[in-house]
Amino acid sequence: MPALERLGAHHVVVSADGRFHGKVQELSDGGVDVCLELTGHATFPAAMRSLRRGGRMVVVGNIDTTKIELNLGALIVYHYEIIGSATCSKQDLVDVFGLVAAGELTPMIDRTLSLDRAAEAHRLLADRAVVGRVVLTP
């Protein structure tokens, strides 16, 4: 069972070619209300096609920085919203730490490594060998 399903995801769609929108539309009865875009060029078109009419895309990452072509007609006809979210406020952090302290939110820490093993941590991340975060300690 994939890690996301163990964590409670109803559906997990994996697409090596970045064309996942058809499966998402099928599973969600026509599209989702909100999607988080984390990658950029490689997944942006399918993420947008995964939205239902009036859907909102929140862009929080841009790993693939290749420029994206945007069909403005789709934004107009389907009433899509695309917004960016790059940071959080101090109050957001206080709220999240409160949820963690109350046991309502559990951070996903794959492993903790000493700082002298930082190169190993980077290799693990590059190899996609972790689920969650790698924490480096002094």
Image (cartoon, rainbow, N blue to C red):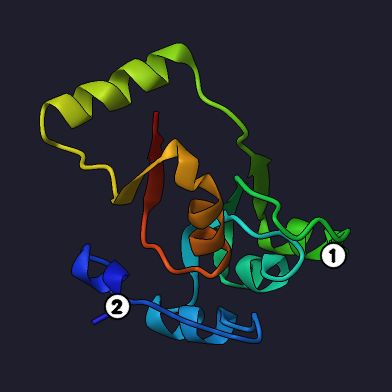
Residue in the picture at 21% in, 42% down:
106
Q: Amino acid at mark 1?
A: Asn
Residue drawn at 45 percent across, 13 percent down: 90
Residue 65, compared with residue 30, is above or below; it is: above
Which residue is farthest front? 116
Residue drawn 40% across and 63% down? 130
> Which secondary structure lies at badge 2?
loop
Residue 1, x across and y down, in percent: 23, 82
Tag 1 residue: 71
Q: Position of residue 84 (x, y in %)?
A: 66, 39
Up-down relation of residue 34 to residue 5 (above or below): above
Considering only vertical position in the picture, is 104 above or below 77?
Answer: above
Give the mark, 2 or 1, whose residue is nearer the N terminus: 2
Q: Which mark is residue 12?
A: none
Labelled disc at residue 2: 2
Q: Amino acid at mark 2?
A: Pro
Q: How many residues crowd around disc 2 within 10 Å: few (fewer than 14), some, or many (20 or more)?
A: few
Observer-nearest of 92 and 56: 92
Q: CA distance from mark 2 to mark 1?
A: 34 Å
Identify the residue at the far left of this view. 103
Foreground residue among 105 and 56: 105
From the viewer's perspective, is the residue at label 2 or at label 1 nearer?
2
Q: Is residue 37 left or right of residue 117?
A: right
